[in-house]
Image: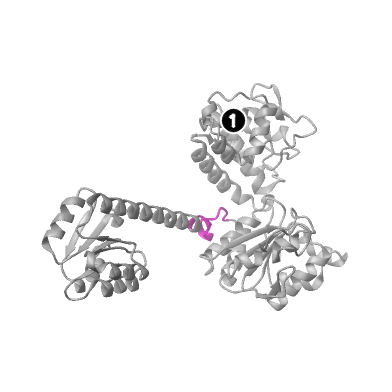
Amino acid sequence: MNDFQKIVVADDEPSICSLLVDLLSDRYDVITVNRGDHVLDKLKTEDARIVILDINLPGLDGIEVLKQIKEYSSRVTVVMLTASNSVSMATTAMRLGAYDYIVKPFDNDKLLIILKNITDKLQLENEVEDLRGEISKNLKFDTLVGRSREIKSVYATIEKVLNTNSTILISGASGTGKGVLARAIHYNSERRDLPFKTLDCSTIPADLIGSELFGHEKGSFTGAISRKIGKFEAVGSGTLFLDEIGNLSFDMQAKLLMVIQEREFERIGSNTVIPVTARIIAATNRNLPDMVKEGLFREDLYYRLNVVPIFLPPLENRRDDIPEFIEYFLKKYNNEYGRSVSIDMEARVYMSDHSWPGNVRQLENTIRRFVLLADHDKLSKNDVERILVASSDSTDLVQNASDQQPSYSLQIINRDGQQRSFEDMEREIILKSLEFNQYNISKTAHHLKLARKTLHNKIHNYGIVIEKRGMIN
């Protein structure tokens, strides 16, 4: 039986203990004690997560036991039992951290509801804890995809500065995994339990990026209808990832430099100084040294950011990692779409020799497409070659981030030698995903990494009829 389903009942009345054992034993593993000074020892040996605690106990009263429990572990949930003349003591216990209290003689149904709520809460906490552990596990350097000499050198550098405050600048072409590496740095560092915030400097209008970074006060400019907390303030002592830093305007570069130097800032429209305790990781796909020479990027800011420089090489320069990426993404999307698609060895060799100008992102999207569209379980070299050759201009078949359709008709050659347009392929992908997700729009949008509005637009544009209207949400 799971630990969170164990309950310690602490009461010196044998009749109460017997009643609770009879009431709860079909749902919980009930352990009884009759002295207050025995409760903590029982928790340590049984590792129970729930305690039903009488306020009046020999050895140590319930209030003192509650204090001991909370000092021992915040993960233990306590329900107080009290007589009608001790309700004030029960409310004191609530202030000290008890979950609830119930008055003797208690209502069995009320107690069962309280315990059901507690077990639901503990179950949710366990799931969140497992999820955090899984996220952390997936982001550890020893589980990141890639074992080439080039990428091992990157990991070795990161390990040396992981728990320092040093600013890190990650450079590399689009699709090489700069954002993945930034998250891995955060979740492997001592800041892992603190926030990780991202600002993509290439997507925020120049006149709004200051507000995004530093926040603003109500009325500080036209449209500032309420106070806004910026990224620096929201991240606290966590990690702030500034993606595509080379797109910052010269004016904003100066402001960012001042924040990094002074370790403080003010919201727009405020005179209140806010200290900066965050770690900054920046990333760029541009050549910042060349931009410095051309007067497009501040030299002083470049040196402030480039304390720990990391270069992520393009995929064609780390071909030893391609087989591992293929295996990783096949497993990922087979699990996601409930498929069992594999790629034979000849096809894998062919893919390892491919140039992949879109780097890891292009490889991932290609394998995702294979898994979605495959009509048999094992793909050959011919199966993958036709699509890769036909899409040699590196245009992704699924335009995940845009409502716009391409202004041309990209032709894809299928295994029968027939040409198919981009639109036909995308329509088929959407139809297959809708069918797989039982026509649930939210789940389909999640699988396709599309906004729900975008998916609705594509369904309308392609004339797709949703058979199960009741499933749209």
Judge by depth and name the residue closer to the eye, 471 or 189: 471
Give the colour scheme of this rendering: one colour
Looking at the image, which residue sits at the far right? 294
Front in this rendered view, residue 116 or 197: 116
| Residue 302 seen anywhere in this rendered image of the structure | no
Residue 435: image location, x then y, percent:
53, 28
Snapshot quadrant of residue 87: bottom left
Question: Picture quarter containing residue 259?
Answer: bottom right
334 to the left or right of 110 = right
The outermost residue toward the left is 14
The residue pinned by badge 1 equals: 373
Q: Is 47 a magenta residue?
A: no
Q: Could you tell whether 42 is left or right of 173 in the image? A: left
Residue 281 relative to residue 37: left or right: right
Q: Give x and y (percent) for residue 290.
A: 83, 63
Where residue 179 sits: x, y (%)? 64, 56
Query: Start and end of the magenta stretch?
Result: 137-147
Q: Residues within 10 Å of mark 1 (few under 14, many from 20)?
A: some
